[in-house]
Image (cartoon, rainbow, N blue to C red):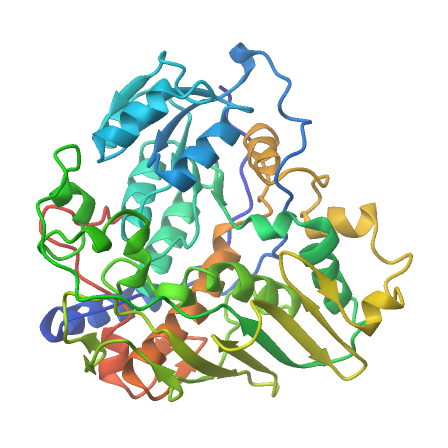
Amino acid sequence: MSRPAKSQTCPSESAGNLPKQSARNGRRRFLQAGSGAVVAAALTPWHAWATRPMMNRSPNDRPNIGCIGVGSMGTGDAREHASFANIIAVCDVDQTRVDAAWKDPNIGKENCDRTTNYREILDRKDIDTVSIVTPDHWHVKIALEALAAGKHVFCQKPLTFTMEEGQLIRKACEKHPELVFFIGTQQRSDRDRFLRAVNMVQKGLLGDITKVTVGIDGSPTGGPFPIATPPEALNWDRWLGPAPLVDYREKRCHYEFRWWYEYSGGKFTDWGAHHVDIATWATGRQNVGHGPVQIDGTDAKHPVEFRHGMPVADDSYNTSHEFNIVCKYDDGMEMVITSKPDNGILFEGTKGKIFVNRGKITGVPIEQDWDKDQFGDAELTELYKGKPYEGHKSNFYRCITEGGLPVSDVWSHVQVMNVCHLAAISARLGRVLNWDCGSNMIKNDEEAAALMSRDPRAGFEYLRS
């Protein structure tokens, strides 16, 4: 499989999370990394999730892919990858899931290799591309090693677990511009809803945007959950990986990991990775050096007690279930990230307002077709950085073949994740944070800055270039 011409490169961003002593070390490391950040900017477009231009190729002309993480989302992604690439290996720390993917007639077809160790996939010279669909706290570690091994990377959202990870992955992508790195933010592919909304805002048809309300729902509550024996098929130590070693509880694992700050950011990074992304892209705040200057997390509740930003209980879901986080930008725009209204995004401008989610796009500007003759192929091509509008994964494989920056790129996604992580940190501490977009640091708050990074568990350290 030939490599594409050099892709565009861009800037770098920041870090992190946790205990006091290691947190200080993380902050010092983060400051050192952030001081060399490049301030450049690439525009941020995206794609749809099922068309066929890149599908109908002979097996000899398709990349070979290894799928790392084949749970529910990983299975769906693998089935889509099979339309474009040859799946020659599947991996998961749960043997039951590995075996299911191996047997799946749309994935392994009982004719691919299977393993519980992702390094066996990365070490193979015959694998061009990897799909990473693991719990969030594993994403960047595997992605850094995949890039170093010369693989193109598809990674599910949210890419980063901490803000430091954003800095690390950007630097790695700068080091490997010949490799395509693609994020699974498929809303960038929804032409009739999200893309129409982005175009309408970017065209100025709503006037100046004064407020964006991002409804992402609240996390579920639950617990206390009992300690249990891990299933025989699951390697619990490996599942935890970079996270602290703790006893197995069924509700900590697999999909339920999202409701524990030890592995994810709850709804802030789950739905936030989608809706904050659209809001940021539409309002032109996706480039390096952009971001809110103040984040107010005083209106946030958690299902367990917190001290110094850390949950006291270890047996219950701990991510925020009720919140209204106000992010202020230097031009006066507000972005409110909230659990309270409908799931979706409300753009309010000086001329009009629209609401969009996965089921609808509404508002007078939509009813009256304010974008008539201003939303067509030319606009879609511009949003897709010069590529044709097509399915989400089609864009990934087109970029592997042709080169160029994909519609769901690392640079803009890290900017989005910075906002999501800042919202979570402010909620965990219950106070206002001041953010310096230039240095990528929280100002005058050591405790908050400590939550921008987390030292990985011994034996699961990051690959640092």
- Front-lying residue, 9 or 265: 265
Number of marks present in the image shown: 0
Residue 287: in sight, yes or no? no
In terms of image quadrants, where is residue 142?
top left
> Residue placed at 42% from the left, 80% from the top?
323
> Residue placed at 30% from the left, 21% from the top?
124
Horizontal and vertical percent position of residue 300: 37, 83
Horizontal and vertical percent position of residue 22: 12, 68
In terms of image quadrants, where is residue 19?
bottom left
- Front-lying residue, 188 or 301: 301
> Residue placed at 68% from the left, 74% from the top?
347
Residue 208: in sight, yes or no? yes
- Front-lying residue, 449 or 184: 184
Horizontal and vertical percent position of residue 270: 42, 59
User: Considering only vertical position in the picture, is 64 above or below 428?
Assistant: above
Horizontal and vertical percent position of residue 148: 32, 37
